[in-house]
Image: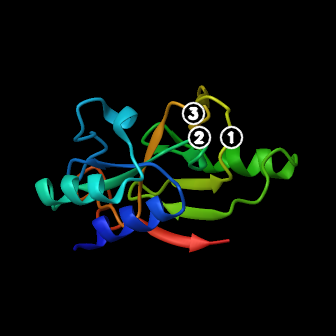
Amino acid sequence: MNDAEQAAHRYAETGWLVLPCAPDSKLPLTKHGFLDASSNHRCIETWWSSHPAANVAIATGRPGPDVLDIDVHPDGSGWAALNQLKRAGLVPDAGAVIRTPSGGGHLYYAGSDQRNGHLPGHHLDFRGLGGYVVAPPSTDTRPAASGGPMMVAIT
């Protein structure tokens, strides 16, 4: 069992729904994308036996986490907007902070029934019900990314 499959099982043990994504990608490998996400260990074993190099993704929103996605693009970064929101007291401390290969981040919070959203022009997206995020130890070694595994820092 590789690291991604082990992580998928650990996430499932917390009740989070997971799914496999193509290697170096966010593209789901299941027929119905995040709608196929599962916490069933037998399902996870089947997915990773068919796709051993798959990245692991987590369906967001209850029962999984809500995730604030900080993007970094050539035209801007969401870190400045996040810091402004934090100074205004509008963003609580996250349970976990994940550094993404692009230099962005994922801030994990307890899951809710809130739907997805974004702040146009500020490079911030909210992943709740109806979304998913690629999670550690997934990798992205495409040229546009910095490559390597996602890093985890527990806050």
Using residue 72 as the reference point, say whether residue 57 is left or right of it: left
Which dot marks residue 61? 2
Residue 129 numbered tag: 3
Earlier-in-chain disc, 2 versus 1: 2
Residue 21 visible in the shown view: yes
Q: Earlier in the sequence, mark 3 or mark 1?
A: 1
Residue occupying image coordinates x 62% and y 28%: 115
* 2 and 3 marks in contact (CB < 8 Å): yes
Instruction: State the separation of the CA atoms marked 2 and 3.
Output: 4 Å
Image quarter where the N terminus lies is: bottom left
Residue type (three-letter) at the residue carrying disc 1: Ser
Q: Are marks 3 and 1 in contact (CB under 8 Å)?
A: yes
Marks 2 and 1, how far apart in space? 5 Å
* Depth order, front residue of 57/1: 1
> Does residue 27 appear left or right of residue 114 in this picture?
left
Q: Earlier in the sequence, mark 2 or mark 3?
A: 2
Seen at 59% across and 46% down, the residue is 63
Residue that extends furthest to the left in the rendered view of this protein: 50
Q: Up-down: is 53 above or below 67? A: below
Q: Residue at x 53, y 43 (%)?
A: 60
Discs 2, 1 touching: Cβ within 8 Å = yes
Image position, residue 130 (x, y; %): 51, 30
Mark 2 residue element: loop
Mark 3 residue element: loop
x, y percent for residue 18: 40, 50
The residue under label 2 is which amino acid type? Answer: Gly
Marker disc for residue 112:
1
Where does the image place residue 41, in percent across and percent down from the top left?
34, 59
